[in-house]
Image (cartoon, rainbow, N blue to C red):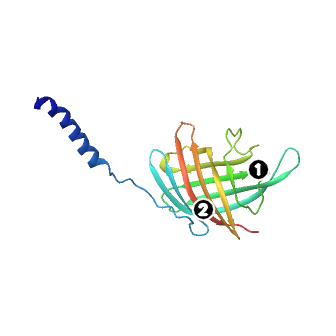
Amino acid sequence: MKRINAIPLGIVLITSITFWCTSYIPSQSYPITFEPEPGHFEMVISGTEELYLSGRVLLDTSRRATDYGNSYPEIRLRLIADGAVHNNFIDLFLATPEVSYPLSGGTYAVTENVKGLFRDFDGVFGFADLDQFGEIPFFSKQGKISIVEANNLLLGSLKMELGNTLGEIIEIEGNFVTYQEP
């Protein structure tokens, strides 16, 4: 009788010990501050590996004309990672009649199914060139950019999913602070 109960009890004991010993496996996590220094960003990129990026953020504006003769601003946020070893950058475009410059607070959704790289899209479009994930660029699939405006500083966060032509997916999440001219 003791032998019959010993096997299931041994399995439970070994499983418990294994779970207890592996329940705390430290993962590599990176701190993202609520507000990076003005002119900078901090991002965590998850894919086949996890990557922490920080660097400078540049803001550029131009005017976009519609087929009907209306125009509205197109805002480009260029996130350039620090470090000379890797070429890492993320470009984000906000192009919608609801956008004004200087930007004010709001949430802007990623445009899905963009037909051309920069032609006739309305909303948010982004692409990333990240050496650690290969030579093929990633293009936005879904997500959003949230903007908070504070005087001449533009505070924002983003959470996006990007994919490449090989079907690989990465997720980007982070914060940025940049200057905007009134």
Res. 134 mark: none
Along the horizontal axis of the image, is 28 left or right of 64? Answer: left
Ranked by sequence position, the earlier of labels 2 and 1 is 1
Q: Which residue is mark 2?
A: 176
Which quadrant would the N terminus be assigned to in this image? top left
Extreme residue toward the front, this view: 1
Instruction: Give x and y (percent) for residue 108.
Output: 69, 51
Report x, y in % for residue 19. 28, 44
Q: Residue at x 62, y 44 (%)?
A: 142
Above or below, 138 against 52 in this view is above
- The residue that label 1 is drawn on is 96
Residue type at numbered disc 2:
Phe
Circle 1 packing at 10 Å, graded few (<14), some (14-19), many (20+), is some
Q: CA distance from mark 2 to mark 1?
A: 21 Å
Location of the C terminus (image quadrant):
bottom right
Q: What residue appears at the point 32 percent right and 48 percent down from the top-left corner?
A: 23
Q: Position of residue 134 (x, y in %)?
A: 50, 45
Residue type marked 1 = Thr
Whether residue 79 sits left or right of residue 66 in the image: it is: left
- Would you place residue 146 above or below residue 2 in this image? below
Q: Nearer the viewer, residue 107 or 82?
A: 107
- Callout 2 crowding tier (Cα within 10 Å): few <14, some 14–19, many ≥20: many
The residue lying furthest to the left in this view is 2
